[in-house]
Amino acid sequence: MNLRGVGVSPGIGHGPAYLLTARVPEPPEGATHAGDADQEKERAVMALAQVAGELEARGDRAGGEAREILKAQALMAEDPGLVVKIRSLIDRGTAAPRAVHEAFTKYRDVLEGVGGYLGERAADLDDLRDRVIAQLTGQELPGLPPPGDTPYVLVAHDLAPADTALLSGHAVAAFVTEEGGPTSHTAIMARALGVPAVVACAGATTLRPGVEVLVDGTSGEVRARPTESDVARAESVDTARQAAIDRVTGPGRTKDGHPVPLLANVGGPADLEAARSCGAEGVGLYRTEFLFLGRAEPPGAEEQERAYRAALEAFPGGPVIVRTLDAGADKPLAVLPPGSAEPNPALGERGLRLLRAHPEVLETQLDALATAGAGSGGRLRVMAPMVTTAEEARWFAAACRAADLPEAGVMIEVPAAALRARDLVAEVDFVSAGTNDLAQYAFAADRELGALSELHDPWQPALLDLLAGLLAAAAQAGKPGGVCGEAAADPGLACVLAGLGAASLSMGPAALPAVRAALAYHTLEQCRAAAESARAATTAAGARAAARAHLTELEALGL
Ligand code: PEP
Ligand code: MG
Protein backbone atom coordinates (compact mmCIF):
# COMPACT_ATOMS: atom_id res chain seq x y z
CA MET A 1 0.00 0.00 0.00
CA ASN A 2 1.35 3.45 -0.94
CA LEU A 3 0.11 6.56 0.85
CA ARG A 4 1.05 10.17 0.39
CA GLY A 5 1.01 13.09 2.78
CA VAL A 6 3.08 16.20 3.35
CA GLY A 7 6.73 15.67 4.27
CA VAL A 8 7.55 18.03 7.15
CA SER A 9 10.76 16.62 8.60
CA PRO A 10 13.21 15.34 6.00
CA GLY A 11 14.89 11.95 5.88
CA ILE A 12 14.08 8.29 5.40
CA GLY A 13 12.79 6.11 8.24
CA HIS A 14 11.50 2.57 8.31
CA GLY A 15 10.31 0.08 10.88
CA PRO A 16 7.19 -1.68 12.15
CA ALA A 17 4.07 0.51 12.49
CA TYR A 18 2.90 1.34 15.99
CA LEU A 19 -0.62 2.79 15.95
CA LEU A 20 -1.54 5.31 18.62
CA THR A 21 -5.20 5.74 17.79
CA ALA A 22 -7.24 5.11 20.94
CA ARG A 23 -8.84 8.22 22.37
CA VAL A 24 -10.67 8.82 25.62
CA PRO A 25 -14.37 8.18 24.84
CA GLU A 26 -16.61 11.25 24.51
CA PRO A 27 -18.66 11.78 27.72
CA PRO A 28 -22.35 11.14 26.90
CA GLU A 29 -24.32 14.08 25.52
CA GLY A 30 -26.74 15.51 28.09
CA ALA A 31 -24.81 14.06 31.07
CA THR A 32 -25.72 16.05 34.18
CA HIS A 33 -24.20 16.35 37.63
CA ALA A 34 -25.82 15.41 40.93
CA GLY A 35 -26.83 18.96 41.79
CA ASP A 36 -23.98 20.66 43.62
CA ALA A 37 -22.69 22.95 40.88
CA ASP A 38 -20.02 24.55 43.08
CA GLN A 39 -18.50 21.19 43.93
CA GLU A 40 -18.60 20.12 40.29
CA LYS A 41 -16.92 23.36 39.18
CA GLU A 42 -14.24 22.85 41.82
CA ARG A 43 -13.63 19.33 40.47
CA ALA A 44 -13.27 20.64 36.91
CA VAL A 45 -10.90 23.45 37.88
CA MET A 46 -8.78 21.05 39.94
CA ALA A 47 -8.54 18.62 37.02
CA LEU A 48 -7.45 21.44 34.69
CA ALA A 49 -4.80 22.57 37.18
CA GLN A 50 -3.60 19.00 37.72
CA VAL A 51 -3.20 18.41 33.98
CA ALA A 52 -1.45 21.76 33.50
CA GLY A 53 0.96 20.88 36.33
CA GLU A 54 1.69 17.43 34.84
CA LEU A 55 2.41 18.93 31.43
CA GLU A 56 4.80 21.47 32.90
CA ALA A 57 6.58 18.77 34.89
CA ARG A 58 6.85 16.62 31.77
CA GLY A 59 8.29 19.63 29.91
CA ASP A 60 10.87 20.20 32.65
CA ARG A 61 11.95 16.56 32.41
CA ALA A 62 12.21 16.74 28.60
CA GLY A 63 13.93 20.17 28.45
CA GLY A 64 14.77 21.98 25.21
CA GLU A 65 12.06 22.84 22.72
CA ALA A 66 9.61 20.42 24.37
CA ARG A 67 9.68 22.48 27.56
CA GLU A 68 8.45 25.61 25.78
CA ILE A 69 5.82 23.71 23.82
CA LEU A 70 4.44 21.93 26.88
CA LYS A 71 4.43 25.17 28.87
CA ALA A 72 2.33 26.76 26.14
CA GLN A 73 -0.02 23.78 26.18
CA ALA A 74 -0.29 23.98 29.98
CA LEU A 75 -1.24 27.65 29.62
CA MET A 76 -4.07 26.69 27.28
CA ALA A 77 -5.50 24.48 30.07
CA GLU A 78 -5.93 27.57 32.18
CA ASP A 79 -7.25 29.86 29.46
CA PRO A 80 -9.76 32.15 31.17
CA GLY A 81 -12.24 31.86 28.29
CA LEU A 82 -12.29 28.08 28.57
CA VAL A 83 -12.69 28.13 32.33
CA VAL A 84 -15.60 30.57 32.09
CA LYS A 85 -17.31 28.37 29.49
CA ILE A 86 -16.85 25.20 31.58
CA ARG A 87 -18.19 26.92 34.70
CA SER A 88 -21.25 28.25 32.90
CA LEU A 89 -22.08 24.83 31.41
CA ILE A 90 -21.81 23.27 34.88
CA ASP A 91 -24.04 26.05 36.28
CA ARG A 92 -26.63 24.93 33.74
CA GLY A 93 -26.46 21.35 35.07
CA THR A 94 -23.90 19.76 32.72
CA ALA A 95 -21.58 17.19 34.32
CA ALA A 96 -17.92 18.31 34.53
CA PRO A 97 -16.51 15.80 31.94
CA ARG A 98 -19.18 16.76 29.40
CA ALA A 99 -18.71 20.47 30.11
CA VAL A 100 -14.97 20.06 29.49
CA HIS A 101 -15.71 18.22 26.25
CA GLU A 102 -18.11 20.89 24.97
CA ALA A 103 -15.96 23.88 25.95
CA PHE A 104 -12.84 22.41 24.33
CA THR A 105 -14.76 21.47 21.17
CA LYS A 106 -15.94 25.04 20.77
CA TYR A 107 -12.44 26.44 21.25
CA ARG A 108 -11.05 23.83 18.85
CA ASP A 109 -13.53 24.84 16.14
CA VAL A 110 -12.39 28.44 16.43
CA LEU A 111 -8.74 27.41 16.09
CA GLU A 112 -9.46 25.17 13.15
CA GLY A 113 -11.41 27.93 11.48
CA VAL A 114 -8.37 30.18 11.75
CA GLY A 115 -6.32 27.62 9.84
CA GLY A 116 -2.57 27.88 9.31
CA TYR A 117 -0.40 27.91 12.40
CA LEU A 118 -3.35 28.30 14.73
CA GLY A 119 -5.40 25.53 13.13
CA GLU A 120 -2.51 23.20 13.72
CA ARG A 121 -2.75 23.81 17.47
CA ALA A 122 -6.13 21.99 17.43
CA ALA A 123 -4.46 18.64 18.18
CA ASP A 124 -2.95 20.12 21.35
CA LEU A 125 -6.44 21.03 22.50
CA ASP A 126 -7.74 17.51 21.81
CA ASP A 127 -4.92 16.08 23.87
CA LEU A 128 -5.63 18.50 26.72
CA ARG A 129 -9.32 17.69 26.62
CA ASP A 130 -8.60 13.93 26.78
CA ARG A 131 -6.21 14.39 29.68
CA VAL A 132 -8.69 16.48 31.68
CA ILE A 133 -11.56 14.08 30.99
CA ALA A 134 -9.35 11.10 31.91
CA GLN A 135 -8.44 12.88 35.14
CA LEU A 136 -12.11 13.55 35.96
CA THR A 137 -13.29 10.02 35.15
CA GLY A 138 -10.31 8.06 36.49
CA GLN A 139 -9.36 6.60 33.09
CA GLU A 140 -5.91 5.63 31.84
CA LEU A 141 -4.62 7.47 28.77
CA PRO A 142 -3.31 5.45 25.82
CA GLY A 143 0.49 5.59 25.86
CA LEU A 144 3.56 4.71 23.83
CA PRO A 145 5.40 1.40 23.98
CA PRO A 146 8.69 1.34 25.91
CA PRO A 147 11.72 1.75 23.63
CA GLY A 148 12.78 -1.60 22.14
CA ASP A 149 15.61 -2.79 19.93
CA THR A 150 13.80 -1.94 16.71
CA PRO A 151 12.76 1.67 16.20
CA TYR A 152 9.08 1.89 15.24
CA VAL A 153 7.09 4.13 12.91
CA LEU A 154 4.62 6.00 15.10
CA VAL A 155 1.26 6.32 13.32
CA ALA A 156 -1.59 8.42 14.74
CA HIS A 157 -4.49 10.69 13.82
CA ASP A 158 -2.37 13.45 15.27
CA LEU A 159 0.29 13.61 17.96
CA ALA A 160 0.28 15.95 20.90
CA PRO A 161 3.43 17.44 22.39
CA ALA A 162 2.86 15.45 25.58
CA ASP A 163 2.99 12.20 23.53
CA THR A 164 6.27 13.01 21.92
CA ALA A 165 8.08 15.12 24.55
CA LEU A 166 9.79 12.22 26.30
CA LEU A 167 10.47 10.19 23.15
CA SER A 168 14.04 9.68 22.13
CA GLY A 169 15.01 9.82 18.48
CA HIS A 170 16.42 6.29 18.90
CA ALA A 171 13.06 4.75 19.76
CA VAL A 172 11.20 6.12 16.75
CA ALA A 173 12.09 5.68 13.09
CA ALA A 174 9.46 8.11 11.75
CA PHE A 175 6.15 9.81 12.49
CA VAL A 176 3.09 9.54 10.24
CA THR A 177 -0.15 11.37 11.08
CA GLU A 178 -3.47 11.74 9.31
CA GLU A 179 -3.91 15.32 10.49
CA GLY A 180 -1.53 18.19 11.05
CA GLY A 181 0.47 20.50 8.86
CA PRO A 182 3.98 21.89 8.56
CA THR A 183 3.72 23.82 11.82
CA SER A 184 1.88 21.19 13.87
CA HIS A 185 3.75 19.98 16.92
CA THR A 186 4.29 16.62 15.28
CA ALA A 187 6.33 18.50 12.70
CA ILE A 188 8.13 20.71 15.22
CA MET A 189 9.02 17.82 17.54
CA ALA A 190 10.01 15.55 14.68
CA ARG A 191 12.43 18.16 13.37
CA ALA A 192 13.78 18.77 16.87
CA LEU A 193 14.39 15.01 17.29
CA GLY A 194 15.76 14.66 13.76
CA VAL A 195 13.08 12.08 12.96
CA PRO A 196 11.47 11.99 9.49
CA ALA A 197 7.77 12.87 9.51
CA VAL A 198 4.81 12.92 7.15
CA VAL A 199 1.58 14.68 8.16
CA ALA A 200 -1.84 15.08 6.48
CA CYS A 201 -1.49 11.49 5.30
CA ALA A 202 -5.01 10.22 4.55
CA GLY A 203 -5.49 6.55 5.39
CA ALA A 204 -2.43 6.29 7.65
CA THR A 205 -4.38 4.84 10.55
CA THR A 206 -5.61 1.98 8.33
CA LEU A 207 -2.03 0.61 8.30
CA ARG A 208 -1.87 -2.75 10.08
CA PRO A 209 -0.11 -2.64 13.47
CA GLY A 210 3.36 -4.16 13.11
CA VAL A 211 3.53 -3.97 9.32
CA GLU A 212 6.90 -2.72 7.97
CA VAL A 213 6.60 0.89 6.75
CA LEU A 214 9.00 3.09 4.75
CA VAL A 215 8.58 6.84 5.29
CA ASP A 216 10.09 9.60 3.13
CA GLY A 217 9.90 12.81 5.17
CA THR A 218 10.78 14.95 2.14
CA SER A 219 8.49 13.66 -0.60
CA GLY A 220 5.71 12.70 1.84
CA GLU A 221 5.58 9.12 0.52
CA VAL A 222 4.62 6.32 2.93
CA ARG A 223 5.00 2.76 1.65
CA ALA A 224 3.83 -0.38 3.45
CA ARG A 225 5.85 -3.62 3.07
CA PRO A 226 8.80 -2.14 1.14
CA THR A 227 11.40 -4.49 -0.32
CA GLU A 228 15.02 -4.24 0.78
CA SER A 229 15.92 -2.57 -2.48
CA ASP A 230 13.10 0.02 -1.99
CA VAL A 231 14.68 0.95 1.33
CA ALA A 232 18.23 1.06 -0.05
CA ARG A 233 17.17 3.23 -3.01
CA ALA A 234 15.22 5.67 -0.85
CA GLU A 235 18.14 5.99 1.57
CA SER A 236 20.70 6.70 -1.12
CA VAL A 237 18.49 9.34 -2.84
CA ASP A 238 17.91 10.99 0.50
CA THR A 239 21.59 11.03 1.45
CA ALA A 240 22.46 12.72 -1.84
CA ARG A 241 19.62 15.25 -1.46
CA GLN A 242 20.54 16.12 2.09
CA ALA A 243 24.21 16.53 1.23
CA ALA A 244 23.29 18.86 -1.66
CA ILE A 245 20.99 20.93 0.57
CA ASP A 246 23.51 21.07 3.41
CA ARG A 247 26.25 22.35 1.10
CA VAL A 248 24.28 25.56 0.55
CA THR A 249 24.32 28.08 3.37
CA GLY A 250 24.10 31.85 3.73
CA PRO A 251 21.60 34.30 2.34
CA GLY A 252 19.23 33.34 -0.49
CA ARG A 253 20.66 33.98 -3.94
CA THR A 254 20.77 32.45 -7.38
CA LYS A 255 23.83 30.65 -8.74
CA ASP A 256 24.99 33.90 -10.36
CA GLY A 257 24.58 35.86 -7.14
CA HIS A 258 21.20 37.58 -7.64
CA PRO A 259 19.93 38.09 -4.06
CA VAL A 260 16.53 36.67 -3.09
CA PRO A 261 16.20 37.18 0.68
CA LEU A 262 14.60 34.15 2.31
CA LEU A 263 12.25 35.07 5.13
CA ALA A 264 10.06 33.10 7.52
CA ASN A 265 6.31 33.04 8.09
CA VAL A 266 5.71 32.98 11.85
CA GLY A 267 2.66 32.88 14.12
CA GLY A 268 4.25 34.17 17.31
CA PRO A 269 7.39 34.24 19.44
CA ALA A 270 7.43 30.41 19.69
CA ASP A 271 8.25 30.14 15.97
CA LEU A 272 11.24 32.43 15.99
CA GLU A 273 13.80 29.85 17.04
CA ALA A 274 12.79 27.46 14.23
CA ALA A 275 13.02 30.36 11.79
CA ARG A 276 16.53 31.22 12.90
CA SER A 277 17.75 27.65 12.94
CA CYS A 278 16.57 27.20 9.33
CA GLY A 279 18.60 30.24 8.31
CA ALA A 280 15.78 32.76 7.79
CA GLU A 281 17.10 36.24 7.03
CA GLY A 282 14.11 37.90 8.64
CA VAL A 283 10.36 37.57 9.06
CA GLY A 284 8.30 37.96 5.89
CA LEU A 285 4.90 37.40 7.46
CA TYR A 286 4.10 37.68 11.16
CA ARG A 287 0.51 36.45 11.50
CA THR A 288 -0.63 38.42 14.54
CA GLU A 289 -3.99 36.63 14.89
CA PHE A 290 -2.46 34.26 17.45
CA LEU A 291 -2.16 37.06 20.00
CA PHE A 292 -5.87 37.81 19.74
CA LEU A 293 -7.22 34.28 19.84
CA GLY A 294 -9.55 32.94 22.51
CA ARG A 295 -9.91 36.35 24.14
CA ALA A 296 -12.86 38.41 25.20
CA GLU A 297 -10.78 41.61 24.86
CA PRO A 298 -7.89 42.41 22.53
CA PRO A 299 -4.42 42.12 24.13
CA GLY A 300 -3.13 45.39 25.55
CA ALA A 301 -0.41 47.47 23.91
CA GLU A 302 2.32 46.23 26.26
CA GLU A 303 1.63 42.57 25.64
CA GLN A 304 1.63 43.17 21.90
CA GLU A 305 4.80 45.20 22.12
CA ARG A 306 6.61 42.32 23.82
CA ALA A 307 5.55 39.87 21.10
CA TYR A 308 6.69 42.19 18.28
CA ARG A 309 9.93 43.10 20.02
CA ALA A 310 10.83 39.40 20.31
CA ALA A 311 10.77 39.13 16.51
CA LEU A 312 12.84 42.29 16.04
CA GLU A 313 15.40 41.03 18.55
CA ALA A 314 15.56 37.62 16.87
CA PHE A 315 16.34 39.29 13.52
CA PRO A 316 18.24 42.50 14.25
CA GLY A 317 19.66 42.70 10.71
CA GLY A 318 16.77 41.51 8.58
CA PRO A 319 13.34 42.89 7.85
CA VAL A 320 10.50 41.95 10.18
CA ILE A 321 7.22 42.29 8.29
CA VAL A 322 4.27 42.27 10.64
CA ARG A 323 0.76 41.91 9.28
CA THR A 324 -1.93 43.75 11.18
CA LEU A 325 -4.79 41.64 12.43
CA ASP A 326 -6.44 39.53 9.70
CA ALA A 327 -9.73 38.66 11.40
CA GLY A 328 -12.81 37.26 9.69
CA ALA A 329 -13.67 34.47 7.21
CA ASP A 330 -11.23 31.59 7.80
CA LYS A 331 -9.81 33.44 10.83
CA PRO A 332 -12.89 34.34 12.93
CA LEU A 333 -11.96 36.09 16.16
CA ALA A 334 -14.36 36.67 19.03
CA VAL A 335 -12.71 40.04 19.73
CA LEU A 336 -13.54 41.38 16.29
CA PRO A 337 -16.78 39.96 14.88
CA PRO A 338 -18.22 41.25 11.59
CA GLY A 339 -20.91 43.92 11.94
CA SER A 340 -23.73 41.67 10.71
CA ALA A 341 -24.44 38.02 9.89
CA GLU A 342 -22.54 37.04 6.74
CA PRO A 343 -23.85 34.39 4.37
CA ASN A 344 -20.40 34.19 2.75
CA PRO A 345 -17.70 35.29 5.23
CA ALA A 346 -14.83 34.95 2.74
CA LEU A 347 -16.49 37.74 0.77
CA GLY A 348 -17.48 39.65 3.87
CA GLU A 349 -16.06 42.12 6.31
CA ARG A 350 -12.57 40.75 6.94
CA GLY A 351 -8.95 41.84 7.16
CA LEU A 352 -8.50 45.57 6.62
CA ARG A 353 -12.24 46.04 6.10
CA LEU A 354 -12.85 44.92 9.68
CA LEU A 355 -10.01 47.04 11.04
CA ARG A 356 -11.50 50.13 9.40
CA ALA A 357 -14.71 49.40 11.26
CA HIS A 358 -12.72 49.10 14.53
CA PRO A 359 -10.08 51.83 14.27
CA GLU A 360 -9.30 51.59 17.99
CA VAL A 361 -8.04 48.00 17.55
CA LEU A 362 -5.79 49.03 14.65
CA GLU A 363 -4.57 52.09 16.53
CA THR A 364 -3.47 50.03 19.55
CA GLN A 365 -1.72 47.54 17.30
CA LEU A 366 0.09 50.21 15.29
CA ASP A 367 1.14 52.04 18.45
CA ALA A 368 2.48 48.81 19.96
CA LEU A 369 4.39 48.15 16.75
CA ALA A 370 5.81 51.67 16.65
CA THR A 371 7.01 51.41 20.26
CA ALA A 372 8.58 47.98 19.67
CA GLY A 373 10.20 49.19 16.45
CA ALA A 374 11.53 52.46 17.86
CA GLY A 375 13.35 50.77 20.71
CA SER A 376 14.86 47.96 18.67
CA GLY A 377 16.96 49.36 15.86
CA GLY A 378 15.49 46.55 13.68
CA ARG A 379 13.87 46.98 10.27
CA LEU A 380 10.18 46.89 11.02
CA ARG A 381 7.70 46.90 8.16
CA VAL A 382 3.95 46.77 8.70
CA MET A 383 1.41 45.53 6.18
CA ALA A 384 -2.36 45.25 5.97
CA PRO A 385 -4.24 42.08 4.95
CA MET A 386 -7.05 41.79 2.40
CA VAL A 387 -6.57 45.12 0.70
CA THR A 388 -8.67 45.58 -2.43
CA THR A 389 -8.30 49.14 -3.71
CA ALA A 390 -5.72 51.91 -3.91
CA GLU A 391 -7.93 54.01 -1.65
CA GLU A 392 -7.66 51.34 1.07
CA ALA A 393 -3.89 51.22 0.61
CA ARG A 394 -3.72 55.04 0.97
CA TRP A 395 -5.86 54.91 4.12
CA PHE A 396 -3.62 52.27 5.70
CA ALA A 397 -0.40 54.08 4.79
CA ALA A 398 -1.79 57.25 6.41
CA ALA A 399 -2.69 55.30 9.58
CA CYS A 400 0.89 53.95 9.73
CA ARG A 401 2.37 57.41 9.21
CA ALA A 402 0.14 58.80 11.97
CA ALA A 403 1.54 56.09 14.26
CA ASP A 404 5.14 57.00 13.30
CA LEU A 405 5.76 53.74 11.47
CA PRO A 406 8.28 54.37 8.71
CA GLU A 407 7.42 51.54 6.29
CA ALA A 408 3.85 50.63 5.35
CA GLY A 409 2.80 48.00 2.85
CA VAL A 410 -0.16 45.93 1.74
CA MET A 411 -0.75 42.29 0.98
CA ILE A 412 -1.96 41.58 -2.50
CA GLU A 413 -4.35 38.67 -2.18
CA VAL A 414 -7.45 39.91 -4.00
CA PRO A 415 -7.48 39.69 -7.82
CA ALA A 416 -8.70 43.31 -8.13
CA ALA A 417 -5.65 44.45 -6.17
CA ALA A 418 -3.34 42.29 -8.29
CA LEU A 419 -4.79 43.64 -11.54
CA ARG A 420 -4.35 47.24 -10.42
CA ALA A 421 -1.19 46.64 -8.38
CA ARG A 422 0.50 49.73 -9.84
CA ASP A 423 -2.18 51.95 -8.26
CA LEU A 424 -1.76 50.26 -4.87
CA VAL A 425 2.05 50.24 -5.02
CA ALA A 426 2.00 54.00 -5.61
CA GLU A 427 0.42 54.47 -2.17
CA VAL A 428 2.77 52.32 -0.06
CA ASP A 429 6.42 51.39 0.49
CA PHE A 430 6.17 47.69 -0.42
CA VAL A 431 3.73 44.91 -1.33
CA SER A 432 3.62 41.21 -0.55
CA ALA A 433 1.60 38.63 -2.48
CA GLY A 434 -0.50 36.23 -0.42
CA THR A 435 -0.88 33.34 -2.82
CA ASN A 436 -3.23 31.33 -0.58
CA ASP A 437 -6.02 33.90 -0.72
CA LEU A 438 -5.10 35.12 -4.19
CA ALA A 439 -5.70 31.57 -5.47
CA GLN A 440 -8.91 31.25 -3.46
CA TYR A 441 -10.38 34.41 -4.96
CA ALA A 442 -8.98 34.05 -8.47
CA PHE A 443 -10.38 30.52 -8.82
CA ALA A 444 -13.55 31.05 -6.77
CA ALA A 445 -12.45 28.03 -4.72
CA ASP A 446 -12.75 28.05 -0.93
CA ARG A 447 -9.24 27.44 0.43
CA GLU A 448 -10.66 25.24 3.20
CA LEU A 449 -12.13 22.73 0.74
CA GLY A 450 -9.78 19.82 0.12
CA ALA A 451 -12.00 18.71 -2.77
CA LEU A 452 -10.98 21.82 -4.73
CA SER A 453 -7.24 21.40 -4.15
CA GLU A 454 -6.53 21.21 -7.89
CA LEU A 455 -7.75 24.79 -8.22
CA HIS A 456 -5.51 25.86 -5.32
CA ASP A 457 -2.42 24.47 -7.05
CA PRO A 458 -0.07 27.47 -7.07
CA TRP A 459 1.32 26.35 -10.43
CA GLN A 460 -1.98 27.31 -12.10
CA PRO A 461 -0.99 29.57 -15.01
CA ALA A 462 -3.72 32.10 -14.17
CA LEU A 463 -2.20 32.57 -10.71
CA LEU A 464 1.26 32.89 -12.26
CA ASP A 465 -0.10 35.64 -14.56
CA LEU A 466 -1.50 37.58 -11.60
CA LEU A 467 1.80 37.23 -9.74
CA ALA A 468 3.80 38.28 -12.79
CA GLY A 469 1.71 41.43 -13.15
CA LEU A 470 1.90 42.50 -9.56
CA LEU A 471 5.62 41.79 -9.18
CA ALA A 472 6.32 43.74 -12.37
CA ALA A 473 4.27 46.68 -11.06
CA ALA A 474 6.32 46.73 -7.85
CA ALA A 475 9.61 46.49 -9.76
CA GLN A 476 8.55 49.33 -12.08
CA ALA A 477 7.79 51.52 -9.09
CA GLY A 478 11.17 50.60 -7.59
CA LYS A 479 9.53 49.18 -4.47
CA PRO A 480 9.97 45.70 -2.97
CA GLY A 481 7.37 43.13 -4.10
CA GLY A 482 7.65 39.89 -2.13
CA VAL A 483 5.69 36.65 -1.91
CA CYS A 484 4.58 35.24 1.43
CA GLY A 485 1.93 32.62 0.55
CA GLU A 486 2.58 28.88 0.46
CA ALA A 487 3.68 29.04 -3.20
CA ALA A 488 7.08 30.34 -2.07
CA ALA A 489 7.74 27.08 -0.18
CA ASP A 490 7.89 24.94 -3.35
CA PRO A 491 11.56 24.90 -4.47
CA GLY A 492 10.72 24.89 -8.19
CA LEU A 493 8.08 27.57 -7.88
CA ALA A 494 10.41 29.64 -5.71
CA CYS A 495 12.80 29.75 -8.69
CA VAL A 496 9.91 30.79 -10.96
CA LEU A 497 8.95 33.56 -8.52
CA ALA A 498 12.56 34.76 -8.47
CA GLY A 499 12.40 34.76 -12.27
CA LEU A 500 9.23 36.88 -12.11
CA GLY A 501 11.13 39.43 -10.03
CA ALA A 502 10.13 38.60 -6.43
CA ALA A 503 12.20 40.78 -4.12
CA SER A 504 11.95 38.24 -1.27
CA LEU A 505 10.30 34.91 -0.54
CA SER A 506 8.72 34.06 2.80
CA MET A 507 7.66 30.59 3.89
CA GLY A 508 7.27 28.20 6.82
CA PRO A 509 10.79 27.79 8.27
CA ALA A 510 11.08 24.08 7.37
CA ALA A 511 10.92 24.88 3.66
CA LEU A 512 13.85 27.34 3.73
CA PRO A 513 16.84 24.97 3.24
CA ALA A 514 15.40 23.28 0.14
CA VAL A 515 14.37 26.62 -1.41
CA ARG A 516 17.82 28.06 -0.66
CA ALA A 517 19.43 25.09 -2.44
CA ALA A 518 17.08 25.26 -5.46
CA LEU A 519 17.95 28.93 -5.99
CA ALA A 520 21.67 28.41 -5.47
CA TYR A 521 21.87 25.78 -8.20
CA HIS A 522 20.16 27.90 -10.91
CA THR A 523 20.99 31.21 -12.54
CA LEU A 524 18.58 34.12 -12.70
CA GLU A 525 18.40 33.54 -16.45
CA GLN A 526 17.25 29.94 -15.88
CA CYS A 527 14.67 31.19 -13.38
CA ARG A 528 13.37 33.73 -15.91
CA ALA A 529 13.17 31.12 -18.66
CA ALA A 530 11.36 28.75 -16.26
CA ALA A 531 8.86 31.51 -15.43
CA GLU A 532 8.23 32.30 -19.07
CA SER A 533 7.67 28.66 -20.01
CA ALA A 534 5.44 28.04 -17.00
CA ARG A 535 3.22 30.99 -17.98
CA ALA A 536 2.99 29.68 -21.53
CA ALA A 537 1.48 26.39 -20.29
CA THR A 538 -2.26 25.82 -20.05
CA THR A 539 -2.43 23.59 -16.97
CA ALA A 540 -0.78 23.52 -13.55
CA ALA A 541 0.93 20.21 -14.32
CA GLY A 542 2.10 21.59 -17.67
CA ALA A 543 3.48 24.71 -16.00
CA ARG A 544 5.41 22.65 -13.46
CA ALA A 545 6.87 20.38 -16.13
CA ALA A 546 7.78 23.30 -18.41
CA ALA A 547 9.53 25.14 -15.58
CA ARG A 548 11.43 22.05 -14.46
CA ALA A 549 12.79 21.58 -17.97
CA HIS A 550 14.78 24.80 -17.36
CA LEU A 551 15.57 24.08 -13.72
CA THR A 552 17.89 21.29 -14.66
CA GLU A 553 19.42 20.63 -11.23
CA LEU A 554 16.18 20.02 -9.32
CA GLU A 555 16.05 16.36 -10.27
CA ALA A 556 19.61 15.71 -9.13
CA LEU A 557 18.90 17.60 -5.91
CA GLY A 558 15.92 15.32 -5.27
CA LEU A 559 13.65 18.38 -5.11
C1 PEP B 1 -2.18 34.27 1.98
O1 PEP B 1 -3.39 34.47 1.91
O2 PEP B 1 -1.49 33.81 1.05
C2 PEP B 1 -1.44 34.58 3.22
C3 PEP B 1 -0.12 34.53 3.26
O3 PEP B 1 -2.15 34.89 4.33
P1 PEP B 1 -3.01 33.82 5.18
O4 PEP B 1 -2.63 32.45 4.73
O5 PEP B 1 -2.65 34.08 6.60
O6 PEP B 1 -4.42 34.21 4.85
MG1 MG C 1 -4.44 35.69 3.31
Image (spheres, rainbow, N blue to C red):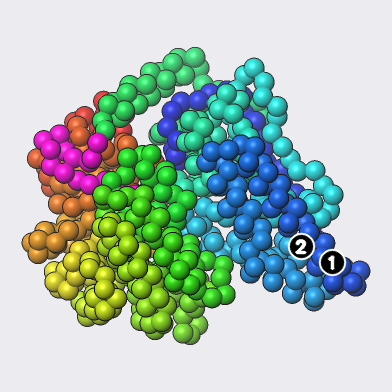
Total marks placed: 2
- Seen at 60% across and 47% down, the residue is 70
The numbered mark, 2 or 1, whose residue comes first in the sequence reads 1
Residue at (45% x, 68% y) in the render: 302
Please name whichever residue, 198 or 535, is drawn nearer the observer in this view of the structure. 198
Query: What kind of residue is marked 2?
Result: Val
> Which residue is labeled 2 in the image?
45
Please check the rendered image and state whether residue 144 is part of the magenta-colored stretch, yes or no.
Answer: no
SS state under label 1 = helix
Indicate the secondary structure of the residue bearing disc 2: helix
Would you identify the image quadrant in which residue 478 lies? bottom left
- In magenta segment, residue 261: yes
Q: Position of residue 358 (x, y in %)?
A: 41, 82
Q: Is residue 97 visible?
A: no
Neighbourhood count class around disc 1 (C-alpha, 10 Å): few under 14, some 14–19, many 20 upward: many
Q: Is residue 84 left or right of residue 315?
A: right
> Quarter-wise, where is residue 162 in the image?
top right
Q: Which residue is mark 1?
A: 40
In front: 357, or 211?
A: 357
Q: Which residues make up the magenta segment? A: 250-265
